Image: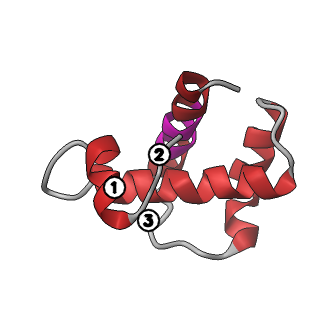
Amino acid sequence: MDENQYNSLIEKIATMMESDGISVDEQNVQKLQKYKDDVKSNSNLNEDDSLKLVYESLLYLKLKNSDSGDPLQKGDEFGAGFS
């Protein structure tokens, strides 16, 4: 999967989470299972990488909802490397 596809998948999952009202601080794996399953069915990512993408989607939402800057550029300040 190339970088653009990966980032598109992050945005797709983040949009789903936003419409479902998931907290950007959610850590309960059971509540995130729906999104992990969606990632696995729409990509060739394994279980661990799918969960990682789900957490990156949460971080993306957190950055997106912050009051300053572009989330993909501001991610460096949080140590996030959106692939």
Residue closest to the eye, 79 or 70 = 79
**Amino acid tagged 3:** Val
Mark 2 to mark 1 CA distance (whole Å) = 26 Å
Q: Residue at x 22, y 58 (%)?
A: 66
Q: Is residue 37 left or right of residue 52?
A: right
Q: Nearer the viewer, mark 3 or mark 1?
A: 1
**Residue 60 image offset from top left, x and y in percent:** 41, 51
In terms of sequence position, does the residue under pointer 3 or pointer 1 come before the other? 3
**Residue 35 image offset from top left, x and y in percent:** 69, 49
- Write down the residue under mark 1: 76
**Amino acid tagged 1:** Asp
Q: Which mark is residue 19?
A: 2
- Write down the residue under mark 3: 24
In terms of sequence position, does the residue under pointer 3 or pointer 2 come before the other? 2
Instruction: Count up the numbered dots.
Output: 3
Q: Main secondary structure of the magenta part?
A: helix
**Amino acid tagged 2:** Ser
In terms of sequence position, does the residue under pointer 2 or pointer 1 come before the other? 2
Name which quarter of the figure residue 2 lies in. Answer: top right
Whether pointer 2 and pointer 1 mark residues with C-beta atoms closer than 8 Å, the reply is no
Regarding mark 2 in the picture, which secondary structure is present there?
Answer: helix
Q: Residues within 10 Å of mark 1 (few under 14, many from 20)?
A: few
- What segment is highlighted magenta in the picture? 9-15
Q: Nearer the viewer, mark 2 or mark 1?
A: 1
Mark 3 to mark 2 CA distance (whole Å) = 12 Å
Q: Is residue 2 above or below residue 77?
A: above
